Amino acid sequence: MHCLLRPFIALLCGLYGFLWFGINYDDVKRLFTERAFHGQKQFDAPGLTDDIFDQCRLQNGPLWTSELKKWLHPEHDPMKSCNRSFSAWSELLPDGRVQLTEACPEEADCRARAVLLKNEYHTTLGKWYEIREEMVFENDIVEVECQIADVVVYSFIHTQIWRGKAKKNLTAPRPKKAEKLAVKPPSVYIIVLDSIGASHGRRVFNQTHRFLKEEFGAVEMLHMNKVGENSRPNGIAFLFGKLISNINRNMYGLPPIPADWNRTVFCKSFLEEKGFILKEFEKKGYVTMMAEDWDKGVFNWPGCYGFQKQPTTHYMRPFQLRFNKDNVGTMKSNMSTSNCFEQHLFLNEYTEKFIKAYPDRPRAFLTWASYLGHDSPNLPFHTDIQYKEFFERNKEEFDNSFIFFMGDHGLRFGWYSRDPVGQRDVNNPMLMISVPRRLRDDVDLMANLEQNSKELLTMFDTHATLVDIAETFSRPGPYNFSETAEKPGRMGSSLLRPLPSAPRNCKTLPIPPQYCLCEIKKERLNITAAHSAIGKTIATVVNERVAEANVSDICAELEMDQLTQLQRVVGAHDLYEATVRLRPGGGVFQTFVRGFSTDYSVVVPDVTRINKYGKQGDCTKMNEIRPLCYCKSDIAKSSSLR
């Protein structure tokens, strides 16, 4: 009798555990219906029963951990010992004339010339004028050179915001509707800090964050999800509202989201008339400015056209082309970090001049600081006080404007990107938004921002917000922010309004699965020789992508070196996150695979490289292929050195 009761008691206990502890049905089913990991079985089509992807659990990791404290150094300041006594020998006066300062030796023979934009890759250098000629420069960028005994000993570039006759053809006319507005439309300032993730932004810009919140009522968007690997796809998403690569959703059992633009459109044709957000503001009567500290440019590198003509009323690009690309030795020396100059400070100086130059017009600008955070998690710490003081100096202006203080993605390489906190940061760029003071009393608007700050967001939502600002404030008030504003064909939703009621997860939003911020539980597995098929499968997919790009003749075929990590996705059917090192080149790649025994398939073909690739792929100009390419020419070079 006891023998007969024993199975029923076990069954009742099992049901009790199932109900009480909330055990996942699929996990229980695996125990009874599937064989061991290496057994023979059939498995479902990808994603069809993986309902874990229908939910989205979002959480922020700790700001500091013992590991972060070990490797991060907030006291790091590369400017600590710079030469603060250095004084420029020249200055550019408000009327466009160059004047020598007291620091200039009497024996120096100095001259100046205009630095003009020829195209996105080259400058046109104007005629030299002796300083004593008092030439008035009717352009933004001016170069000064001084010689002593026929040797160039001083070179410097000055900036100004020239509003003279030369700007008549560049500045968009004020629309008649805008002239009738009782209140000038608010200015819009977009400040991008490359490779700054959300949590690292809170650590690095601690004082700046606090200042923005306390003085401008800024709201931090906690769960902004990047939509592409690097700067270009994310930049095009929030500045044009376009997707430039297909989003493969095999992992969810869903069809792909097709790209809006292919490479011909976003790279091998000019970007004019394609909806650049600053152009949209210009059409509404705004005066605009754009400045990047990287001379290669977010829309240009590598080998892309960018803009055919100057895209904004004021464009700082001639400065960076002359300073970085032309690599003038004395200029690099005079304007170096040893003399307390930094690339992002050049941007901030130009920005402040732009703000002051147009008190009568609404302004929209974009600055993009690439050098500051791109390669090191420690380098940005010393700039916290710089940005806080930048906002303080221009407090009245920023207090009455929209501010987007943001990153494009997190730090993608190095130890930080492998740390659990840093791994999330890679896909979670910083975004803080503040609205003009006169709008902070709008209960609906502020409630929407606060609520949306806790939701899963994308760069397309940032774009929709910018479009909303341009369209809404070009009309007379009052303004109603209580309703969702959805437009056919637009991927994003304005953060100033309620978001659509549909579920927000990586299945429903345009987010590639490999970058998804939604938390999923993973179980680390011990790697055995039997798992080598996974690494070989990933290597095959990487080689196929290189072949599809027609660069197999210049990129080496890769093979598995070592499967370094394997994690099972709990609650999903035979889904694993795998990390593999390939050779030659030592590239470390990560993606999701499905299968068992020796039968695996990669369900996210857009394999992500998670270690630095430097110049390994420079033989191809396809930005999306460079991380996957190890140039055959490098193999030949290394062989010749043996």
Image (cartoon, grey):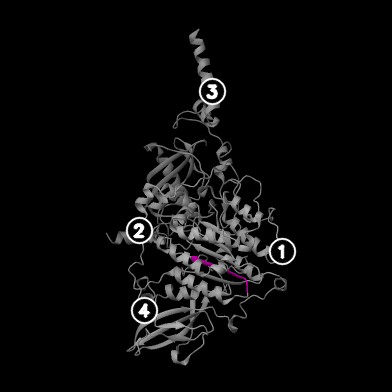
Q: Which residue is mark 1?
A: 477
The crowd level at tag 1 (other Cα within 10 Å; few <14, some 14-19, many 20+) is few
Measured as percent of width and height from the top left, residue 26 is found at: 54, 31
Q: Which residue is mark 3?
A: 16
Q: Nearer the viewer, residue 226 or 164?
A: 164
Q: Secondary structure at mark 4?
A: helix
Residue at the spot 48% in from the left edge and 70% down from the top edge: 348
Q: Amino acid at mark 4?
A: Thr
Whole-number angstrom distance, CA of label 3 to CA of label 4: 78 Å
In this view of the protein, can residue 300 be seen by the observer? no
Q: Amino acid at mark 1?
A: Gly
Q: Nearer the viewer, mark 4 or mark 2?
A: 4
**The quarter of the displayed image where residue 79 is located:** bottom left
Over which residues does the magenta segment extend? 361-368
Name the dominant secondary structure of the magenta segment: strand
Q: Nearer the viewer, residue 192 or 54?
A: 192
Label drawn at residue 561: none
Residue at the spot 40% in from the left edge and 43% down from the top edge: 565
Whole-number angstrom distance, CA of label 2 to CA of label 1: 65 Å
Whole-number angstrom distance, CA of label 3 to CA of label 2: 62 Å
The crowd level at tag 4 (other Cα within 10 Å; few <14, some 14-19, many 20+) is some
Q: Which residue is mark 2?
A: 635
Whole-number angstrom distance, CA of label 1 to CA of label 4: 54 Å
Q: Is residue 494 left or right of residue 230?
A: right
Q: Say which label, 3 or 4, has the lower sequence index.
A: 3
The crowd level at tag 2 (other Cα within 10 Å; few <14, some 14-19, many 20+) is some
